[in-house]
Image: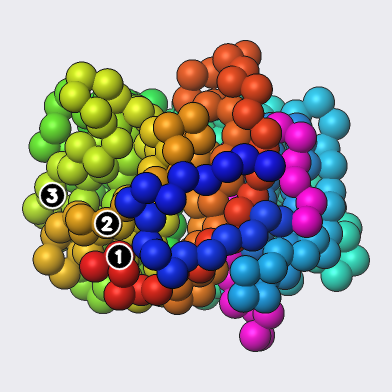
Amino acid sequence: MIAHAATGAPSQATFAVADVNPKDTVSCMQAIDAKGRKLLAAGSWDGSLNVYEVNEIKATNIVSHAESNVAIMRLCFNETGEIIYFATSSGEIRSLTISSKQVVPLGNHKERVVGIGYYAAQKVVVACSADGCLQIWNATSKQSKKEIKIQGKPTAMASYENSVFVATDKQKIFKVDLNKPDTQEHIDSKEKRQGLYTCLAINPQPGNIQVLAGSTYGAVEMIVGHNSKIFEAHRNGNQAFAVNAVAITQRGFGISGGTDGKLCFYVFNSVAKTNNNIDLGKDVHVTALASIADGIVAYAVGNDWSKGAMDKTQQETQIIIRKYAAKEIM
C-alpha cells in the first residue's frame, strides 16, 4: 500500500482504499448521488470500468466491466446514475447499464475523446475529440443529432446541463450552449505560458461562468465571469507538475490534483486559493479526482500519465476515498 504523508494535511482527515483497484492508471472518475446511493465510477488505461458504492469512506465494488485492447479515457453518468456513458482510446462511445451490466455502442469519434457529458433535459450525450469534433447523440435512439467544429485542438472538456466547455491548445476555452448549439463564445487564458489545459470542472452558478482549469504547466486557472486568476499551485520554483484533475465539491469549492502529490483547494466567491493542501507525498501522482459528498473526495494515484502512456513510474494504482472536515480547507 502507498504511504501517504501527513505533512500539510488536515488533521482530522481519514482515508480508505477501494476494495478493487485497476491494474493501470485511472484516467477518469465521476461520482453521483443516485437516490441516496453514492456511486463512484472509474475508468482506467487497462480497459476496466469499475463502479463503487461509497458509504462514508468505504468503497465497495458493485460492477466491473473490461474492454479489450483499449483504454477507457472519459466517462459520465446519466441523471439517475443508472447508466454510464464512456469513451475508449479508439474513439468509441458506449453505454453501460449498471443493473444489467449491458454494454451498448452509441457512436464513434475519429480521434481520442477528451471529454463526455450528459444533458438530461434533451436526453443527449455530448463528446468532444482531439480533432475538434464536438458530437451530440440522442441517448435513446442512439442517433447522431449534430456535429460542431471547435477551433483548435481540444485538450479537455466539461459539461453541466446545457453548458459545454471545451479547452484547446490555443489557450482558449470555448462555451457551447446545447440549447443554441450553432453559437459559441470563448474565454482567453491570461497566462500564455500556462501550457496545455489538461482538465476542466464547472461550478454551476446561474448566469455566471465559473470554471476551474488545470494545465501541464502546474498552474490552475480560476475563471469567474470574464475574469480569471492564475494559481501556480503545482509548481516548485522552476519545476512544473502537471495538473491531471480538477473537481468541484457540493459546497462549491474547487480541488486540483497533480503529479506533485498534492490536493489543493480554491474558493470561487473570493477567487482565491486556500492556504491548506493535502500533501500525499512527493512520489505520489494524482491522476483523477471526484467529489462524492460534502467532505468526501475520491482520488486515484498511479503512473504519471501526463508523461505519456509508456513512461511507467511503477507506482501502484489505487482509488482512495478521503474524508476531511470542510472547515479545515478554508
Position of residue 325 relative to residue 257, above or below, is below
Q: What amino acid is labelled 1 in the image?
A: Ile
Q: Is residue 26 magenta?
A: yes
Residue of label 2: 276
Q: How dense is the environment of label 3, judged by Cα within 10 Å: few (below 14), some, or many (20 and up)?
A: some
Q: In the depicted view, which residue is nearer to us: 79 or 253?
A: 253
Please name whichever residue, 298 or 156, is drawn nearer the observer in this view of the structure: 298
Q: Residue at x 25, y 31 (%)?
A: 235
Report the Cα–Cα distance between label 3 and label 1.
22 Å
Screen quadrant of the C terminus: bottom left
Which region shows up in magenta?
Answer: 19-39
Q: Which picture quadrant has residue 157? A: top left
Q: Residues within 10 Å of mark 2 (few under 14, many from 20)?
A: some
User: Residue 26 appears at what percent x and percent y?
Assistant: 63, 40
Dot 3: element = strand
Residue of label 3: 228
Q: Is residue 39 visible?
A: no
Name the amino acid type tagged 2: Asn
Left or right: 310 in relation to 177: right
The residue at the point 80 percent across, 61 percent down is: 61
* Residue 136 picture location, percent across and down: 54, 51
